[in-house]
Image: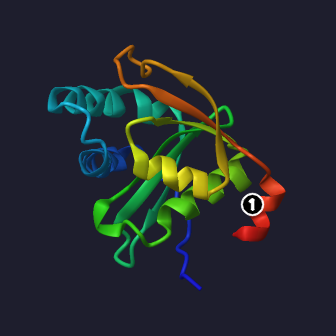
């Protein structure tokens, strides 16, 4: 059984570190986004997006943030893992906490990010809709996902 760390609540003073993790994660998984757009999104993350969600994070043994998620209105608005910590179950842990403790059962994922899509399918999500453009109107299609059956999911966890 995998060792699980405690879920923490990051502070505004952690935003620069969250943005570093966000950028490293995006560059590792969103190869379809041009650099200029990543820079634009990072600025929006720091100035608007982080303040618009309830944030949770995981930390390593040295108390450094290893991954984070943001939830608003029953929806996981962001979930990013530092690439150095990928594959250790942190994404699943953050997602489970968002589902079980923050009542989040919906999220959007870039259609062009097959790794994330596969992860969410494995966690029990299904596609319930699609839009041609992202939240800023750019041509990066989003898939709208919803958790199928939370009770079934709890037995698998």
Neighbor class of circle 1 (other Cα within 10 Å; few <14, some 14-19, many 20+) is: some
Q: Is residue 98 left or right of residue 142?
A: right
**Secondary element at image label 1:** helix
Q: Which residue ends up furthest to the bottom in the rendered image?
A: 1
**With respect to residue 95, does 22 lie above or below?**
above
* Residue depicted at 26% across the width and 29% down the height: 43
Q: Nearer the viewer, residue 107 or 111?
A: 111
Q: How many marks?
A: 1
- Quarter occupied by the C terminus: bottom right
| 131 relative to 127, above or below | above
The residue at the point 41 percent across, 69 percent down is 87
In x, y percent, where is residue 141? 43, 25
Expressed as whole percent of the image width and height from the top left, the position of residue 102 reads: 69, 47
Taking the image as shown, residue 28 lies to the left or right of residue 119, namely: left
Along the viewing direction, whichever of 36 and 32 lies nearer the viewer: 32
Disc 1 marks which residue?
153
């Amino acid at each position: 059984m995998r060792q699980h760390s405690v879920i923490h609540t990051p502070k505004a003073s952690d935003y620069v570190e969250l943005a570093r993790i966000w950028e490293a994660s995006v560059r590792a998984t969103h190869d379809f986004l041009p650099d200029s757009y990543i820079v634009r999104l990072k600025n929006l993350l720091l100035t608007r997006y982080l303040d618009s969600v309830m944030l949770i994070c995981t930390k390593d043994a040295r108390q450094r943030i290893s991954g984070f998620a943001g939830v608003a209105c029953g929806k996981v608005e962001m979930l990013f893992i530092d690439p150095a910590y990928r594959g250790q179950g942190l994404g699943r842990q953050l997602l489970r906490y968002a589902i079980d403790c923050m009542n989040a059962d919906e999220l959007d994922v870039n259609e062009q990010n097959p790794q994330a899509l596969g992860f969410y399918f494995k966690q029990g999500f299904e596609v319930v809709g699609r839009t041609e453009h992202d939240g800023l109107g750019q041509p990066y299609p989003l898939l709208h996902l919803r958790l199928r059956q939370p009770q079934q999911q709890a037995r698998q966890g």
